[in-house]
Image (cartoon, rainbow, N blue to C red):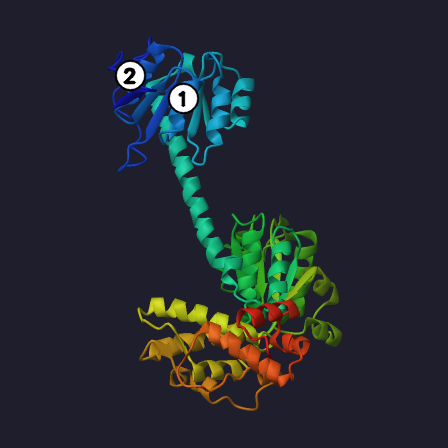
Amino acid sequence: MGHTAGQTPGRGPPSLPGQKKQTGCPTAPIFPDVTPTLLIVDDEKSTRDGLRTALEDKFDVYAAPDAAGAWQLLGKEPVDVLLTDLRMAGEDGLALIRKAKALPKPPVCILMTAYGSEDLAVEAMKQGADDYISKGRLQIDELELRIQRALRRTRLETENEQLHQRLDQRFGLGTFIGETPVIREVFERIQQIGPSTATVLITGESGTGKELVAKAIHQLSRRARGPLVTVNCAALPATLLEAELFGHEKGAFTGANERRIGRVEQAQGGTLFLDEIGEIDATTQVKLLRLIGERTYERLGSGRTQSADVRFLSATNKDLKALVRSGAFREDLYFRIAVVPIHLPPLRERVADIPLLAQAFLKEFARENEKAVAGFGTEAMDLMLRYRWPGNVRELRASIEHAVVLCRGDQVQARDLPASVREPLGEPGPSASVTPVARAPGRLSLREAEKQLIIHALRECDGNRTEAARKLGVSRRTLHRKLHEFELHDL
């Protein structure tokens, strides 16, 4: 059906003057369930009517005689494609395209003109046009094909953007949970480092979230649209790690029956994450030094040098400086990979974040297991706050999943936690001394757990707020705000 700005006209001539529409369309509709809307803008009525009649079997067509009428319609109706003439009374087609592209949901914009030139085509693209077509050579089938291609490209770009938004939500900073100063400092460092090109070394105990940090840095970088390729250096023997990294030619060694692309080549245009880099042997360290320093490498069995367009991130749970001193790790390689270091604190150094993390994991696993579990009993939270968590956040997450699966009510109780948490071996560490929660009967909400943490910390420190804030891992200002929030002025 055709429409004109302000009214619905009758049917126009069957085709453009001097043009005959060929039968059959070489493309299938891009949106099988929704007819795309097309706005034709041309000050020649015969051209408008001819285009409308030729295209209305594939599109829901609107028409306007000038930019002003088109802009009025764009403000009221969602338009998928804007097909506009260049030279018109008032604003020209390029000005209209600029305005249309500034809309929250801009249409595909195609410029038509009888005054075709290469310079004009370049300028049209600079102004935001998705395509350019000369009226003198206009064929309806070609126009339909170019509109469909532009729509397909726009749809793919939209889907790609939505995918990356979902990835940002999953792997970006929104995944990190914590309010203690040590973890907030990590968040700020990631935000600073992400957009840079720097080589980063992520250190920390197992289970602190080093791979998650690598994913966040990649997502915040200018390489976010490229691949993130991970190599677990500890999972491969030295004889295979080199081939895995650099790839190999057929016959390079026994068992190399075909040519294989290495992880470096797979990461072209993106990021290469070397996890557990402290495990690599001396020979591979030499080749890695060249790779990171010169951005070049060779496949095994090949003498041809290749360029590596990748960003390097590394991680380890070992003390690389100690390995350098012992001669097990090259000092020059250490300085190459540790241009910007990030250290992840163990969970025992951010005890005040345990209730936040536990609640987030509880919500996740309650939803996955379709269970109405909403919180933690007092004793269960007490045990989690006392425990040292040698496996860090990874262990906490697994323990909450275990508890949710075994929970028989709407609150996780002490009996639901793993035995390792209920009956920990050894004495609690120094930071556990501030975390016990009063064993009062009933349920303990996240808010109440936080309140009890503050009360016990202040009692442990004889009311010294500066010392209590330090033990809790928060600033004195945050502690003061929490005291006011919980009406604990007398403590």
Residue 243: in sight, yes or no? no
The amino acid sitting under disc 1 is: Ala
- In the picture provided, is 100 more to the left or to the right than 2? right
Residue 191: x %, y % from top left: 61, 55
Q: Nearer the viewer, residue 468 or 222?
A: 468
* Residue for badge 2: 21
Q: Quadrant of residue 80?
A: top left
Q: Quadrant of residue 143?
A: top left
Q: Nearer the viewer, residue 156 or 298?
A: 156
Q: Residue at x 53, y 61 (%)?
A: 230
The amino acid sitting under disc 2 is: Lys
* Residue for badge 1: 70
Q: CA distance from mark 2 to mark 1?
A: 26 Å
Q: Nearer the viewer, residue 442 or 180?
A: 442
Q: For the C terminus, give its image quadrant.
A: bottom right
Q: Nearer the viewer, residue 444 or 54?
A: 444
Marker count (numbered): 2
Q: For the N terminus, give its image quadrant.
A: top left
Residue 161: x %, y % from top left: 45, 45
Q: Residue at x 47, y 19 (%)?
A: 93
- Note whether 91 is above or below 481 in the view shown: above
- In the picture provided, is 38 more to the left or to the right than 262? left
